[in-house]
Image (cartoon, rainbow, N blue to C red):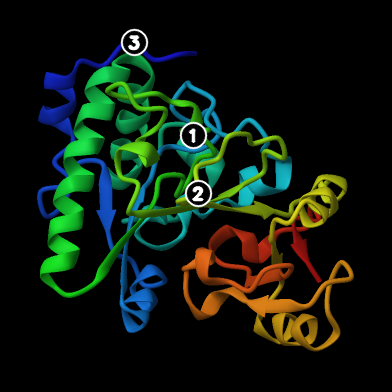
Amino acid sequence: MTKPALSFSEFKRIVKGSRGFRLLTVGNPKTAKGEGHGYFTYILHLSPARLSGFEVCAGRTKGCTLACLNTAGRGGIMAGQGILTHADVANGVQNTIQRARINRTRLFFTDRAAFMALLVKEIGKAIRLARKNDLVPVFRLNGTSDIRWESIAIDGAASIMSLFPDVQFYDYTKLPNRKNVPANYALTFSLADGNEVWARMALNNGMNVAAVFRDESRVARAISEGFLGRPVFNGDMSDLRFLDPKGHVIALYAKGNAKGDQSGFVRD
């Protein structure tokens, strides 16, 4: 059932955020690797699938829905519960991080203007903070979603990327028909259970394809042997997908609930 509208004032009351950010997440263990390359990644985490009552992952599969990184790391830790699953969150077993993601998503759908205004404000703040520390700011707006950000106009601009033309944005996607993608928005197609035809099409159209393998040893074998007829690059070296060599499969190893996946989303 769709949740009722969330006002901006109520959102500010119940979502406190961290370091002055209510929408953007400032660093995590994987994106922190980018600092060694001179970049600082800020991520927007919405609530995936329909956990908020609103669909944000139109191209999702059964496997990626259950294995989503939404419940990896701190997002899946809840005292007395163990690691949260997709079903737990759907059934109302939610920690502070899950509730914040749900409320961000509700605001996005029920007060788009307020959401986008806040996002612009936070991106501006993030740029200043990164540059103050001599790092290049980069942004992932689909940390746990698959929104067509290039299609959302704002302040007379075609997209938020157009408002910040000198800033790099990047994301994973399972939507093969993304169009009018700005030059500063790098997309990597995400292989999952049942979408291999689309993944091969993405490769043929010049996109890299990310694939999740069972463990680090399987990643090493893929790098040695290739995958889908293409050379393989280790995507766990950093999260900076826009720096990956072109024409590659980007190998990641399973994390969180994906470790137990048997749907075909994780490759053995």
- In the drawing, does residue 207 fall left or right of residue 11? right
* Sooner in the amino-acid sequence: mark 1 or mark 3: 3
Q: Which residue is mark 2?
A: 183
Q: Position of residue 132 (x, y in %)?
A: 10, 68
Q: Position of residue 266 (x, y in %)?
A: 73, 62
* Sooner in the amino-acid sequence: mark 3 or mark 2: 3
Q: Which residue is mark 1?
A: 150
Q: Quadrant of residue 244?
A: bottom right
- Residue found at the very far top of the displayed protein: 4
Going 70% across and 56% down the picture, which residue do you hit?
207
* Sooner in the amino-acid sequence: mark 1 or mark 2: 1
The kind of secondary structure element at disc 2 is: loop
Q: Position of residue 238 (x, y in %)?
A: 47, 75
- Position of the C terminus by quadrant: bottom right
Q: Quadrant of residue 152?
A: top left
Mark 1 → mark 2, Cα distance in angstroms: 10 Å
The amino acid sitting under disc 3 is Pro
Vertical placement of 222 versus 2: above or below? Answer: below
Q: Position of residue 17 (x, y in %)?
A: 17, 45
The kind of secondary structure element at disc 1 is: helix
The amino acid sitting under disc 1 is Glu
Residue 80 appears in view: no
Mark 3 → mark 2, Cα distance in angstroms: 36 Å
Q: Which label lies toward us, 1 or 2?
A: 2
